Image: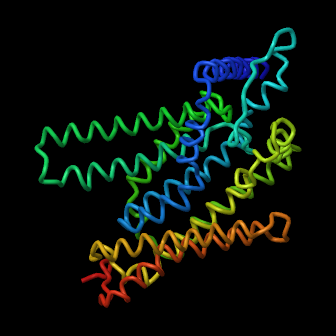
Amino acid sequence: MEKALAFVESYHKWGAESIEFLQMLLPGRGPFFISVSNLGDPGLAFTFYFPIVIALHAGLGTRFMWSIVFCEWSNMLLKWLMVGDRPYWWVNETKLYSKSRPPILLQFPNTCETGPGMPSGHAKLNAAMFYILVSALNTMVISKTTLLTDNQKKLAKRLTWLAYGTWMALVIIARVYVAAHFPHQCIYGALIGFLIAVLVSRTPSLHVLSRRQYVMISAAIVVTVLGMYFVVLAMGSNVLWSVEKAIKWCVQRSYIHIDSTPFYSFSRYSGVSLGLGLGLSSKWFRKTDQSRFNYKMIASMVVLNLAASATGVYIHKLLSPAMFGWYVVEFTLNVVVTFLIVAVIPNFVRAASNMPPGDKYKKK
């Protein structure tokens, strides 16, 4: 055990010194890397990317969101299991620098995340969701276009994967630069996210399960997280240890955000998983058949989806974390907003456009 801890500490030491070197090598680049980190934020994936993607293509949107849900769910379990430190508090508590100067790490508005650091949720989520999008772009657009020759299609596909790799490198560097993660945490997160996206892509049945099966998936997500929570408590561990460290070592209290706490994330992705399942198994979704939608209808869906999502964000900001049942209210809010986006809004657009209902899943 001591050798294992020493090995981890050596990784942390190398990582902290790498962060200090990176910040010194690229002075004043904080705003740029903050922007990169914000663009890949889980909150944006739920509230901005998903409403747009599912309006463009229901199947793609479904794969996109399931990959996000499974990333967030596995991330919470792994963080509790692996108990990883974050650089900004580790440098202040380690004994490795008792006889020398510890690395001086600058902090930024998105440095002080409150969950454990291993693995990186940002890296995992970006690896998964953009793998889904790039794969879809290649198979649904580039492969089918008649505007390119075969050689040009191959080149275009290589460029999309190059863009994917470049973006992932930027996300990893950004998370390291702001001292939110050690480098190895980002690499592990990216690898896990990639594997999750591949598995989701190869499981088309996630699009056509029954309501009972979707409810069972959501229940399994809730039960495994709560089960892990009580196991950790039974072992005498403090589940909120990372929150306490964030509060203690963050240089500005305003840098600490409630939506980075483990249980807020849990209320969000568990609610979204149930809302997604209920929406996909509803008669409204099955009767809509978005494959028949024209560009005007798709544009209307994008606008209405974003409006519903923005309303959910607005209500979230009105709620106080101190209120009784806050997590239950957040869970319910995510169920409702997701159901609206998946089932209600597409059916409303269909009806408003005088398009007769059509069930593409109905057996002929």
Q: Where, by quadrant of the figure, is residue 270 drawn?
A: bottom right
Q: Looking at the rendering, in which quadrant would you find the N terminus?
A: top right
Residue 319 vertical placement versus 146 (above, below): below
Task: Provide residue 190's location: percent of width, then percent of height.
Answer: 52, 37
Residue 69 vertical placement versus 288 (above, below): above
Label tally: 0
Residue 204 is left or right of residue 76, and the answer is left
Residue 353 vertical placement versus 77 (above, below): below
Task: Provide residue 310's location: percent of width, then percent of height.
Answer: 58, 68
Task: Provide residue 177's location: percent of width, then percent of height.
Answer: 62, 30
Residue with the most extreme front position = 28
Task: Provide residue 188's location: percent of width, then percent of height.
Answer: 56, 33
Residue with the most extreme top position = 99
Residue 164 is left or right of residue 236, and the answer is left
- Which residue is rendered at x = 46% and y = 79% of the image? 345
- Which residue is rendered at x = 67% and y = 49% of the image? 76
- Which residue is rendered at x = 57% and y = 65% of the image? 273
- Which residue is rendered at x = 58% and y = 30% of the image? 29
Q: Nearer the viewer, residue 158 or 213?
A: 158
The figure's colour scheme reads rainbow
Residue 269 is left or right of residue 290, and the answer is right
Q: Looking at the rendering, in which quadrant would you find the C terminus?
A: bottom left
Q: Nearer the viewer, residue 249 or 266?
A: 249
Q: Where, by quadrant of the figure, is residue 27 drawn?
A: top right
